[in-house]
Amino acid sequence: MEKSMQRYWKSNLTYMTILLAIWALVSYVFGILLVNELNAFHLGGFPLGFWFAQQGSIYVFVVLILAYFLLMDRLDKKFDVHE
Amino acid sequence: MSLQAWTYLIVGVTFALYIGIAWSARVKDTKGFYVAGGGVPPLANGMATAADWMSAASFISMAGMISFMGYAGCMYLMGWTGGYVLLALLLAPYLRKFGKFTVPDFVGDRYYSSAARVVALICAIFVSLTYVAGQMRGVGIVFSRFLEVDVNTGVVIGMVLVFFYAGIGGMKGITWTQVAQYCVLITAFLVPAIAISAKLTGNFLPQIGFGSTLVDGPNAGKYLLDTLNQIGTDLGFAEYTAAFSGPGSKPMIDVFAITMCLMVGTAGLPHVIIRFYTVPTVRAARISAFYALIFIAILYTTAPALGAFARYTLTNVLSNASYATAPSWFKNWEKTGLLAWMDKNNDGVITYRAGAPFKGKPIFSGETGPAGQRLLKNEATDNANELYIDNDIMVLATPEISQLPPWVIALVAAGGLAAALSTAAGLLLVISSAISHDLYYRIINREASEQKRLAIGRVMMGIAVLVAGYFGINPPGFVAQVVAFAFGLASSSFFPIIVLGIFWKRATKEGAICGMIAGITFTMVYIIQTKFMGVAPWFMNISPEGIGTVGMLLNFAVTVGVSLVTAAPPAAVQDMVESVRIPRGAGAAVDH
């Protein structure tokens, strides 16, 4: 693989790792592992952990996919591999 | 106009619309039949993916399941949306660049082996058949309740319709009807949810109303969720928002495993993956995953709100009400067997408490009791609960319970049908293409003409419809349970080997074949043992719905282990893996 392609792939993997870490944080950590601890806090009528489990994580998922699209769009152009 | 007339009108208009769209999108070549010619705009693909994805289970059963599970309903909500993050980041762009027709195509080429292709196509057929049976059943249930035809006749009507538009239009017809079906199903889901939210909380957005205060009744001024917690405690249920505690709640490890299994299964379901073959570029694949999840999130953030509203309304109306004065919808739904009342203490009052009122599903004796209720032959349990409520009733009956106008109720019927039909069509295409493309063209007859392949694709579609209809008439379990089975199998078979195939050049054919077989065998045996043979969940108390997570890890471990001790893949395959990692040069999908 060419040098620049290796750098392109590495940036892609970095983006992926960061976004997947956020994905796991909001769903598995906030929504499941720490749900009882977070339920001590409230967001309007929602206990916070419950909100993450039934609402918040889904909103974050949508944002994550958009972020990946935007980041990769820029990266593709930078490395001149866009379509 | 009566409810019946409204239902016939709205369902009739939507069916005519689907048929019209399919006719104008009919196809003449295999590329149109399998991948809609590869020219679907990302926004349309997002909408089609959402309709493809949201099945009868999402539309009819999910809000009801959540309303009985409270917090633990999050495993469906996160599981069936979080998988799109995996799909968008790990699979869709690369599979689009690879650019073939089917999932077994990728597996067969990446793992340079017909054996791997055959294992993949068997998995694809198995997963899709399990899933499609549930859809046909969903069609039957909607027909029987709203159009007052027999469930089996309903299934047959659904079969004819799906065969017509999937057969003539292939993927192209399916895509554009799914776009229309999305619009129907989301309207049908939102209208009652918004109306109920406004009625209960004064807030039009169900997502906000969910966390707001109630406007009238004895609990006016209190938060809805606090009130539900209170009602739960009073009647002996778990608190609505409490996690992992109270009667019947799942332990943390199980919620974790089920959520993971549904996420990974989502990303591994062939009928979802192939939707990303239909867009023109890698960039379009990435953005259409985003559109798809937005369209899905609209329903998935509304469903838990609707579940909570329905739970509150139903408990309020039915708990401690006398049967004689119960509203007319109670008797209507009693006829379908989705509601039942066993007057254990003979006081004529409906006592609603935690626990099952009697063993199994209602079996009516055909006689009526002193209050006019349908008598049951089931053996009573020793708790105080007298009320049987099926999950499916929550979405289907809530508009009636909340006294919304008949056209809203008719719209819900059309929405349920749209959800079931759109998913069924996508699944049938996977089954048809697995046999006619992967098996017949790629393995048996490489010389087959375009005409012949298209004809075989259509014949296979017809056979798949018949098989799905058979399972719809003789269902193997209730809708959501069957779907859970499909997720376990999808997560333990495809997901690991596709991800490794893209991100690890060293993965070999021996590794992939052993991994798929190990993952799917373990998962299947566990599900059959625990669901059908009465064995207690023996692996860390994980229930059969979540065991796909373990199957997936096993598949990963076996694939990696076996790959390391077998010869590296040929250079051509390694070059192919490098090329799928770079977006440029993704032409339209090709069939060789």
Image: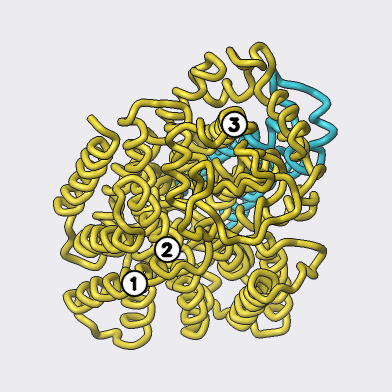
In the picture as drawn, the residue positioned furthest to the bottom comes out as: B444
Q: Which mark is residue B132?
A: 2
Task: Identify the image quadrant of the C terminus of chain B.
Answer: bottom left
The reply to whether callout 1 and callout 3 are in contact (CB within 8 Å) is no
Please name which of the two marks, 1 or 3, marks the residue nearer to the observer: 3
Q: Same chain, marks 1 and 2?
A: yes
The reply to whether callout 1 and callout 2 are in contact (CB within 8 Å) is yes
The residue tagged 1 is B464
Comparing B480 with B458, the one in front is B480
Residue B471 shows in the view: yes
Amino acid beneath label 1:
Ala
Q: Is the residue marked by circle 2 packed among few (<14), some (14-19), or many (20+) residues within 10 Å? A: many
Horizontal side of B357 relative to B121 (left or right) equals right
The residue tagged 3 is B321
Secondary structure of the residue carrying numbered label 3: loop
Residue B338 shows in the view: no
Q: Earlier in the sequence, mark 1 or mark 3?
A: 3
Distance from disc 3 to disc 2, alpha carbons, whole Å, reads 39 Å
x then y, percent, for residue A27 = 70, 41
x then y, percent, for residue B331 = 45, 41
x then y, percent, for residue B280 = 34, 51
Q: Earlier in the sequence, mark 1 or mark 2?
A: 2
Amino acid beneath label 2:
Val
Secondary structure of the residue carrying numbered label 1: helix
Residue for point 33% across, 38% down: B184
Residue for point 26% across, 59% down: B157
x then y, percent, for residue B420 = 39, 52
Q: Same chain, marks 3 and 2?
A: yes
Q: Is the residue marked by circle 1 packed among few (<14), some (14-19), or many (20+) residues within 10 Å? A: many
The colour with which the image depicts chain B is yellow
The colour with which the image depicts chain A is cyan
Task: Identify the image quadrant of the N terminus of chain B.
Answer: top left
